[in-house]
Image (cartoon, rainbow, N blue to C red):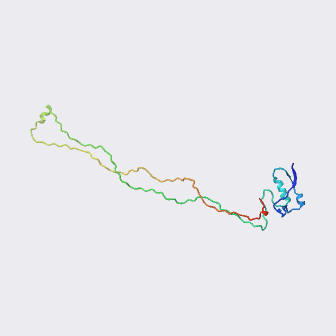
Amino acid sequence: MAQHESMAPLQAARMQPDGRLQVPYDKATVRSAPTVETGTEQPLGTDQLAQLYRHYQLGEQAGQPPQRMPGAPEVVRSEERLRVGTESEPAGAARLSKRVVTENVQTSVPVEHDEVSVVHEPISEADRGAARAGIGEEQREMELRAEHPVVAKEQVPVERVRLSKDEVVEEQPVNAQVRRELVDADVPERARRNR
C-alpha cells in the first residue's frame, strides 16, 4: 500500500561516527516539505522534483545544471578536434610535343612500256607494184616509249591532337592524432555526490 512521506536531499548529508546520516535541515523544514508517494517503483516526476528543490532552496530546477558556487575551484577542459579540408596544389604538368620519325612505305603503281614484235605479211597484188623498188639496204626506226614511277611527297594534315582534363573525386583516408584533457577530481568518498 502506498504511503506519503517527506523527503530531504542527501547532497549535503554527512555520515556520523555512530553510523547515522545527518542532513543540514531541522525537523520542521523536513516535515513541511512536499510529500511524495512511496511504496511504488515509479520515479519522481519533474514537478515533484522542482517542488523539493524550491522547498529546500537548492537553487537547482530539475533538468538544469547546478549553479556555480563563488570561489569554488574549477578548470576548463579542452580537446582537439580534427578539421579536415582540401587545398589545391600543382601536381605536375602535361604537355604535347611533336617529333618527326622516318618510316619506309612500300606500294606499287602500274607502268606502261612499248614492246616490239616483228610481223611478216605476204605482199598482196595491190602492193606488188609499189614494192618493186629494187634491192638495196634500208633502215627504218620506230620510237619506243616506257613509263617509270615518279615519287613526289606532299604534306597533308591528318588529325588534331589536344589535351583535356577531367576532375575525378576519390575517397582518401586521413589519420591524425588528437589530444584531449581528462579531469580527475580527488574528493574524499564521504564528500562525493553522484550526478
Q: Nearer the viewer, residue 93 or 49?
A: 49
Q: Picture coordinates of residue 17 (x, y %)?
A: 83, 64
Q: Nearer the viewer, residue 10 or 162?
A: 10
Q: Nearer the viewer, residue 27 or 95?
A: 27
Q: Residue at x 84, y 54 (%)?
A: 48
Q: Is residue 177 above or below residue 39?
A: below
Q: Picture coordinates of residue 131 (x, y %)?
A: 12, 36
* Quadrant for the C terminus in the image: bottom right
Tally the numbered discs.
Answer: 0
Query: Which residue ends up furthest to the bottom in the rendered image?
Result: 71
57 to the left or right of 92 = right
Q: Residue at x 88, y 52 (%)?
A: 4
For residue 186, what is the image quadrant?
bottom right
26 to the left or right of 151 = right
Q: Residue at x 83, y 56 (%)?
A: 50
Q: Picture coordinates of residue 20 (x, y %)?
A: 85, 61
Q: Picture coordinates of residue 47 (x, y %)?
A: 83, 54
For residue 76, what is the image quadrant?
bottom right
Q: Residue at x 88, y 59 (%)?
A: 30
